[in-house]
Amino acid sequence: MTEPILEVNDLRVRFGTKRGVAEVVNGISYDLHPGETLAIVGESGSGKSVSVLALMGLLAQPPASVLGSARYRGEELLGMPAKDLRSIRGKRLAMIFQDPMTSLNPVRTVGYQLIEPMALHLNLKGGPARERGLELLELVGIPSPDARFSDYPHQLSGGMRQRVMIAMALACDPDVLIADEATTALDVTTQAQITDLVAELQQRIGMAVIWITHDLGVVASIADRVHVMYGGRFMEQAAVDDLYATPHHPYTEGLLGSLPMPGPDRPERLMTIPGLPPDPVTMPSGCSFAPRCTYADTDRCLQAVPPMELLGNLHSTACFYPLAVAR
Amino acid sequence: MNDVLVDVQDLEVHFPVYGSGLIRSHINDVQAVDGVSFQIRRGETLGLVGESGCGKTTTGLALLRLIEPTGGTVTFDDIDMGSLAAGQLRTLRRRVAMIFQDPYASLDPRMSIGKIVGEPLDIHDLARSRTDKHRRVGDLLEMVGLSPDYRNRYPHEFSGGQRQRVGIARALATEPDFIVCDEPIAALDVSIQAGVMNLLEDLQRDLGLTYLFIAHDLSAVQHFSDRIAVMYLGRIVEVADRANLYEHPHHPYTEALLSAVPVPNPVVERSRHRIILEGDVPSPIDPPTGCNFNPRCPKVFEPCASQDPVLTAAGGHDVACHLYGGEA
Amino acid sequence: MSGSTEFDRLATKPVSRTRETLQALVANRLAVAGLIVLSLLVIVGIFGEVIAPYGINDIDIPNRLTRPSGSHWFGTDELGRDVMSRVLIAARVSLQVGFIAVGFALVVGVPIGLVSGYYRGTIDSVLMRMMDVLFSFPAILLAIAILAVLGPGVGNAMIAIGLVYTPIFARITRGSVLVVSGEVYIRAARSLGAGDRRIIFRHILPNVLAPIIVQTTLSLAFAILSEAALSFLGLGVQPPNPAWGRMLAEGRNFFEQAPWMGIFPGLAILVTVMSFNFVGDGLRDALDPKQKSVIESRGQSV
């Protein structure tokens, strides 16, 4: 196993709000290896997006406060001086977001925005920058890149804009691409195009990808490893086949059971998870999921936070009463 | 009693586009819904699925005359909806209802949920007295899994899933026969979606409802519907029952759509052959000549770019494709 | 099962938007100060004669133009009348004109805005063009022109100022109605069979009140200022009734000898207008939906 390119240890993010301190990320740890695709899956409020924003140093502190450690190639990212962080962010660690319309500057042409990271990090300008820009547009499958170069974001479709974002992210050959709900706002056929594209580029360039999403279908189609996140913590970490075949955590089981499975047979009634996700300002003591868990034992589960324990080959769960359900 | 409750023939909704300048002449049309026909039988659920811009939501709204159709007919229980005057239409609205996509926007923020659910009873004068109305509102809230104790609360105090339930209770207040569900779960978290879907299923069974289920999520549509109609750029390209559509999709767009939907099963995903479509969905202002899908169709051939295919029966499916004899 | 229900998050008592707004308003110190001052003003307006130590016309020539002292806190004017009593009693007129003028503008302007914004089309064009005509005149000029036609006097001043402020209420109402008309819950009401009347009065009006309320307080400030300007020009309240604006005008002539004649009415105008502004700003902030709780965010990825 090669050296991990990213090591996150006990990452915590808190926000000061009018109602009190919101504990949005409550101690997550994971490694990312070169070339692998890691999916962090969770619903809204799970803290998954905030955790990667913290990694990239994109959270204003205050009102946020970020604790723990995140090392990129051995260098600590959290607390790194802004100047040094800027030379990593966009160059070695790149990010694409959910809504390309608001992440792209509407008053600048596509070409201008594409060249910006190159000018910033690689000191490329003028002719050579434009050439590389056109190369990138071709790489992400945009037809007539020459014409698109002088277009504005609103002149392109959602799928095209997302491709432009990917091109911008790749401009400096990053090691790690973080995709934060990058296909959530896209139609399913466009989503297929984009996930296909990222997989293909990953093969070609050899970069690692962290995919943040709530869509368990997308995860199944692109991930090598999966971390399931709930209430700011990881509930389960496993290789993708293992997670779907043998989920050990009740939350994972609930999530998988609540999905309609396409198929010719008469559909079964969907599983539901009672209750609501926790309010980050009033996080329950003990396991984040315990208040909604059908298997929870009030004495133990509500009092203490279950540690992440290895249960099988690369498969860990944070649960006092893990399941061993074969699906 | 006729078995067909809703009969839509050649429904058309074209929005005019005006030029700029002093004389704002009518230069073009957005052909949002361009000749859509289907039937819904009593007690069944017809799923209407398609991607953004295909016109499915507009179809649902035009069905209930919340948007006026520019062509075609909609017949509800043998009543021609287009011919109804305002008063008659209002009376008819007791029998048809709609559930909206956005639980945050579909409830008046200034009304308590009790008032929201009770409003249809006021509009149609259905409650015999205040006590009667109070009891009925309580029953409706319970029916959707909400405690009547909360009737004086306001929408913003509830979660998205709970608000959607309020919207459902409101839709049920007049005991309708037919409900148009416009993306009812799209805005909800995954673990909440199942609860709302189960509720809709239970209500259908218990109350004998007929549904038009509009969604872009093919898995949800497939789970929930008896028959499915697939829309692309304002037209229906295929109609089939759920099992048939899944196992033997006829129309190339249906095939591409099915193959693009990711299945939550990594082993299956790896072994799938994905059909990746080229390009993007064209604009409904300027649809292609002939079949709307022809510029992106992997199976395009001679007649596709010049002739509009017609929805024809082919082996249990209705398909609008020249591969299956779509000539007029 | 540990029994957390999905209703644990609900507060102990129903929280209507109105309650939230009032809570937010009360938290704003300036707004509270403004409210206190305005309440005092209203009391003065109602009980002016009782509170004031002297009458408005207690002429006392031997004591004319005396500076502020124990017996005349604001001094006396050129006829020996107590300035403070006149200032206090003039408050009533200012408030009357302000409230009635703005009331007029509301009663005329809001329905115009409702009809325009809801029905759109030709009626909207016609009504808005009419509003544009009124709007295009500078407020004071328009008021003066109207009074030139109607003749000077308090009642006519109220009508004049009311007409001047009608377009802004129509505009603001119309703008909000346009936004609210497009909201899904309006379409939902239609789907239930609600008619235009129910939709306009039960759904649209309550949801467009916020900007109208804010504009009302701000317009009250302006109306009082306008009244002062009109009476300064001799067009509003007629002598011997006191009015702050006219007192300013009269004070001008005696500015070197008795500056207090102008200063105190001027201060009265200042304090009143500022108080309305503070309350108006406070209301605007309290009603601003962006200030609502963090948890309400819609589907933002967290």
Image (spheres, rainbow, N blue to C red):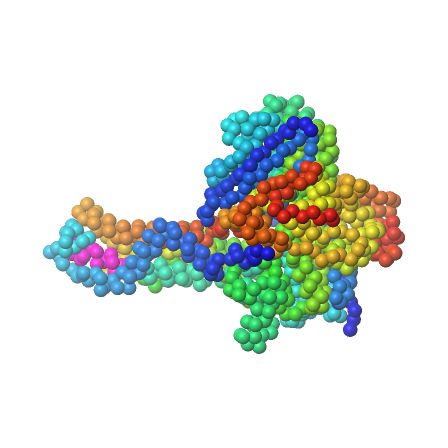
Is residue C185 found inside the magenta-colored segment of the image? Answer: no
Percent x, y for residue B89? Answer: 66, 69
Quadrant in the picture for the N terminus of chain B: bottom right
The residue depicted at 60 percent of the width and 31 percent of the height is: A7
> What is the residue that sits farthest to the left in this orientation?
C62
Asked if C127 appears above or below A234 in the picture, the reply is below
The residue depicted at 41 percent of the width and 55 percent of the height is: C23
The residue depicted at 57 percent of the width and 47 percent of the height is: A287
Is residue C77 found inside the magenta-colored segment of the image? Answer: yes
Q: Is residue A89 left or right of residue C97?
A: right
Percent x, y for residue A91? Answer: 61, 28
> What is the residue that sits farthest to the bottom in this orientation?
B128
Quarter of image, res C72: bottom left
Instruction: Let me know if residue B289 appears in the view.
Output: no
In the image shown, does C254 or B257 lie closer to the viewer? B257
Percent x, y for residue B54? Answer: 72, 51
Quadrant in the picture for the C terminus of chain B: bottom right
Percent x, y for residue B183? Answer: 67, 55
Query: How many numbered callouts?
Result: 0
Q: Which residues are magenta?
A: C75-92
Instruction: Let me know if residue A31 appears in the view.
Output: yes
> What is the residue that sits farthest to the front in this orientation?
A299
Asked if A204 appears above or below C259 in the picture, the reply is above
In the image shown, does C89 or B39 lie closer to the viewer? B39
